[in-house]
Amino acid sequence: MASGDKFYLADKATLDEVKGKIGNTTDTGGSNTTGSVFGKLNYLVSQVSSYLSNIYNRIGSQSDTANSSTSSSTHAKLNWFLNLFGKTDDSGATVTSGTVAGKLNEILARGCVKSVQKGLITSDPSVINISISSINPSKSIVLVSFTNTSTTSYLTIAVGVRAEIVNSTTIKISFTSGVGYTSGANWQVIEFY
């Protein structure tokens, strides 16, 4: 064989058959069982593009917004969540408005205790009702302790003292047996937010 002579591995019919199986870059309609190699590749590229587009739409953009945690794109849901919880420096929240961080900052700014009322009973009845400023009984506690109010050496031994919230404007202090007229009680009503 001389230099420059053409050497064919297959005849033209075989090469045309192979070329037909490879196809052209513009071929479409491929599947796993039919179509040219390029048709199958183009089908695969279109499927991947479709899946990626669907994923991108579900992710969304950073400016997406939503009005619940179950609607819209992932970015919208994340923005809804971040807006619900807020930033650490949020303030001005109320019971019905504002972010979670804003509400927490309001509680921390004013404290957890709404009011404290206190007094000393120096009388000797076994039960006494005391009028107080209005409170929410379900958010309040009453504390009481026995005290000896005598200025003499006479010491009275008390078995105990008990306090309870009767209603929003009344507490009741009860002394148990063994208390004499030199006894008393310190009381405090603490109301929380």
Image (cartoon, rainbow, N blue to C red):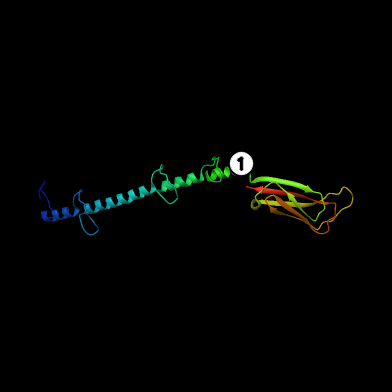
Q: Residues within 10 Å of mark 1 (few under 14, many from 20)?
A: few
Q: Position of residue 44 (x, y in %)?
A: 27, 53
Residue at horizontal 51 percent and vertical 46 percent from the top:
85
Q: Amino acid at mark 1?
A: Ala
Specify the quadrant of the image occupied by residue 174: bottom right
Residue 101 in the figure: left or right of residue 152: left
Residue 114 seen in the current view:
yes
Residue at horizontal 16 percent and vertical 54 percent from the top:
20
In the image, farthest residue toward the right? 153
Residue 11 seen in the current view:
no
Q: Position of residue 172 (x, y in %)?
A: 74, 54
Comparing 52 with 62, the one in front is 62
Q: Position of residue 109 (x, y in %)?
A: 61, 41
* Vertical comparison of 63 with 177: above or below: above
Per the image, the residue denoted by label 1 is 109
Dot 1 falls on a residue whose secondary structure is helix
Q: How many marks?
A: 1
Residue 90 in the figure: left or right of residue 153: left
Residue 58 in the figure: left or right of residue 19: right
Residue at horizontal 45 percent and vertical 45 percent from the top:
79
Q: Position of residue 182 (x, y in %)?
A: 85, 51
Residue at horizontal 71 percent and vertical 51 percent from the top:
170
Residue 66 in the figure: left or right of residue 96: left
